[in-house]
Amino acid sequence: MPLPTEAQRQRLCDLMAAAFIELRYLEGEQAHDLAYAFHNLPKEMYGWGAWNLDTVRARLQRYQDKHAERPGFPYVAAFNDLFPPAA
């Protein structure tokens, strides 16, 4: 799977920035889960790990599904906008 382009990495950084902003307002397990959803992304998007769109998307989806009662930033929709899922 090809690594993200420079433009895609910039947008992924915007997504991570949104997560950091949201983390300032979260507590406990939800904060942990959001951090877990993103913690590998900085290295993965540069090839220092296993870059896989489905894996990243699944981590974001798990977070959103688990915390659907307190919706925040639409991480999965933003990721899908950047990397549309296969039809």
Image (cartoon, rainbow, N blue to C red):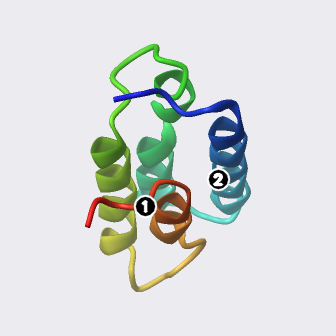
> Quarter-wise, where is residue 21 in the image?
bottom right
> Quarter-wise, where is residue 8 in the image?
top right
> Is 63 rendered above or below residue 50?
below
Q: In the rendered structure, which disc, 2 or 1, sits on the residue that comes first in sequence?
A: 2
Residue at 46% of width from left, 25% of height from top? Answer: 44
Q: Of tags 2 and 1, which is closer to the observer?
A: 1
Residue type at mark 1: give it. Pro
| Mark drawn on residue 84 | 1
| Secondary structure of residue under mark 1 | loop
| Numbered-mark total | 2
Residue at 48% of width from left, 27% of height from top? Answer: 3
Residue at 33% of width from left, 23% of height from top? Answer: 50
Seen from the viewer's position, the closer of residues 70 and 83 is: 83
In the picture, which quadrant includes the C terminus?
A: bottom left
Q: Are marks 2 and 1 in contact (CB under 8 Å)?
A: no
Residue marked by disc 2: 15
The image position of residue 16, as x and y in percent, is 64, 47
The image position of residue 60, as x and y in percent, is 40, 57
The residue carrying pointer 2 sits among few (fewer than 14), some (14 to 19) or many (20 or more) residues within 10 Å by Cα, namely some
| Secondary structure of residue under mark 2 | helix
Seen from the viewer's position, the closer of residues 4 and 72 is: 4
Residue at mark 2 to residue at mark 1: CA–CA distance: 15 Å
Residue at 51% of width from left, 81% of height from top? Answer: 71
The image position of residue 42, as x and y in percent, is 57, 29
Residue type at mark 2: give it. Leu
| Mark drawn on residue 19 | none
The image position of residue 65, as x and y in percent, is 31, 73
Determine whether, in the image, residue 17 is placed left or right of residue 64: right
Determine whether, in the image, residue 79 is placed left or right of residue 14: left
Outermost residue to the front: 87
> Is 5 rendered above or below residue 55?
above
Outermost residue to the top: 48
